[in-house]
């Protein structure tokens, strides 16, 4: 395990100490590790939301392009029928 030194303002440090004293965590380090885990989970969720939004926008754009191509195919087929007919 790697050690990282962190400086906290008095208010934040007091909150970390309070959470640790309340008995849920064995040490202040555990409080901070859990906070970082939660932060990283939220960051990942945000990335996934953004990726999903891009996917949905791309999917919509691809569907619009496919619809436009299909419409042109119908017009082209009709034009070919008139030429052949």
Image (spheres, rainbow, N blue to C red):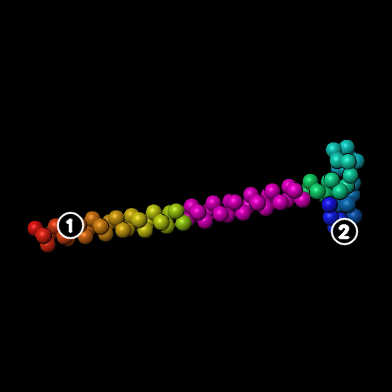
How far apart marks 2 and 1 lie (CA) works out to 74 Å
67 relative to 8 in the view: left or right: left
Q: Which mark is residue 42?
A: none
Q: Number of numbered discs present?
A: 2
| Farthest residue, direction left | 85
Q: Which residue is located at x 84 percent, y 52 percent?
A: 1
Instruction: Determine the image quadrant of residue 80.
Output: bottom left
Q: Which residue is located at x 86 percent, y 56 percent?
A: 3
Place of residue 50 in the rendered image (x, y in percent of width and height, measured from the top left):
57, 54
Instruction: Determine the image quadrant of residue 25.
Output: top right
Residue linked to disc 2? 5
Q: Which residues are magenta?
A: 36-57
Place of residue 68 in the rendered image (x, y in percent of width and height, measured from the top left):
32, 58
> In what element is the residue under mark 1?
helix
Q: Which residue is located at x 54 percent, y 51 percent?
A: 52
| Farthest residue, direction top | 23
Main secondary structure found in the magenta portion: helix
| Farthest residue, direction front | 1
Query: Does the CB distance between marks 2 and 1 fall below 8 Å?
Result: no
Which of 60/1 is in front? 1
The mark that comes first in sequence, 2 or 1, is: 2
> In what element is the residue under mark 2?
loop
9 within the magenta span: no
Q: Is residue 80 visible?
A: yes
Q: Which mark is residue 78?
A: 1
Q: Badge 1 local density, few (<14 within 10 Å), some, or many (20+)?
A: few
Q: Which residue is located at x 21 percent, y 60 percent?
A: 76
């Amino acid at each position: 395990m790697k050690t990282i030194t962190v400086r906290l303002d008095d208010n934040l440090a007091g909150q970390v100490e309070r959470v640790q004293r309340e008995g849920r965590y064995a040490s202040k380090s555990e409080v901070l590790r859990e906070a970082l885990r939660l932060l990283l989970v939220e960051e990942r969720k945000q990335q996934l939301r953004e990726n999903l939004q891009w996917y949905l926008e791309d999917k919509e754009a691809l569907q619009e392009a496919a619809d436009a191509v299909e419409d042109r195919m119908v017009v082209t087929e009709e034009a070919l029928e008139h030429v052949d007919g």
